[in-house]
Amino acid sequence: MKRIFLLAAIAIFTLQSNSVNAQEKTKDAINFAKVDVSPMDLVVYKNQDEEVVARVIYSRPQKRDREIFGKLVPYNEVWRTGANEATELTLYKDMKVADAMVEAGTYTIYTIPGEKEWTVILNNRTNTWGAYEYTDQEDRVRIKVPVRNAPSTIESFSMAFVTKADGADLLMGWDNKYVEVPFKAVQ
């Protein structure tokens, strides 16, 4: 009888313990990690036939009352062009970036912000964190584009493709500044 009582007590304790552990595991599973303060985003450029021609994946840091260019993002230094992982560009068709021919493929977009112009870099090295692994030996294209004043404050770093007759411009803006990078279809 003592054995039956002891086995029953062990079984009840084990069931209660497993139930508590299961509840804790379930509770942990529904407590998602804190939302990233620089969430990932994606922009797509489609041609007139609605085919995806280019895609950019990037993270969107927030201004949060900070001085951005020249301070948080230093002038004349390579920047990952966003936050977290370096910004990734995939071209699904050959394109011209400014006057440089770029084959279909995946590249990292780095920039070197300046007060009056930015150097925009398409680099062959991909899947990098920040600009820590950047080397200009992997550059595919480097172009300079003028800095423009935004009509209003851009709270989150943002990108957008604006379709043109012969391609699209990739707009990159944050705070009170933006740049346009011309992409042209190859005929």
Image (spheres, helix red, strand yellow):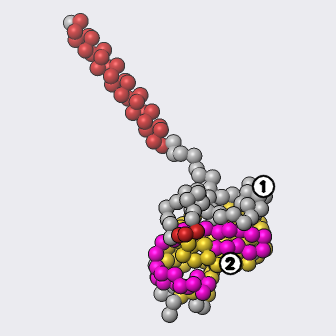
Q: How many marks?
A: 2
Q: Which amino acid, mark 1?
A: Asp
Q: Residue at x 55, y 59 (%)?
A: 133
Q: Is residue 161 above or below residue 113?
A: below
| Residue 159 x %, y % | 63, 70
Residue situated furthest top in the rendering: 2
Residue situated furthest bottom in the rendering: 187
Residue position for label 1: 65
- Looking at the magenta stretch, what is its main secondary structure? strand
Q: Dot 1: within a 10 Å radius of its alpha carbon, few (fewer than 14), some, or many (20 or more) residues?
A: few
Q: Which mark is residue 144?
A: 2
In the rendered structure, which segment of residues is drawn in magenta? 93-120
Image quadrant for the N terminus?
Answer: top left
- Discs 2/1, front: 2
Q: Is residue 37 above or below residue 3?
A: below
Name the residue nearer the viewer: 34 or 106.
106
Rendering quarter of residue 156: bottom right
Cβ atoms at labels 2 and 1 below 8 Å apart? no
| Residue 18 x %, y % | 36, 28
Rendering quarter of residue 61: bottom right
Rendering quarter of residue 182: bottom right
Element at label 2: strand
Q: Is residue 104 left or right of residue 43?
A: left
| Residue 160 x %, y % | 62, 74
Q: Residue at x 63, y 52 (%)?
A: 37
| Residue 48 x %, y % | 52, 88
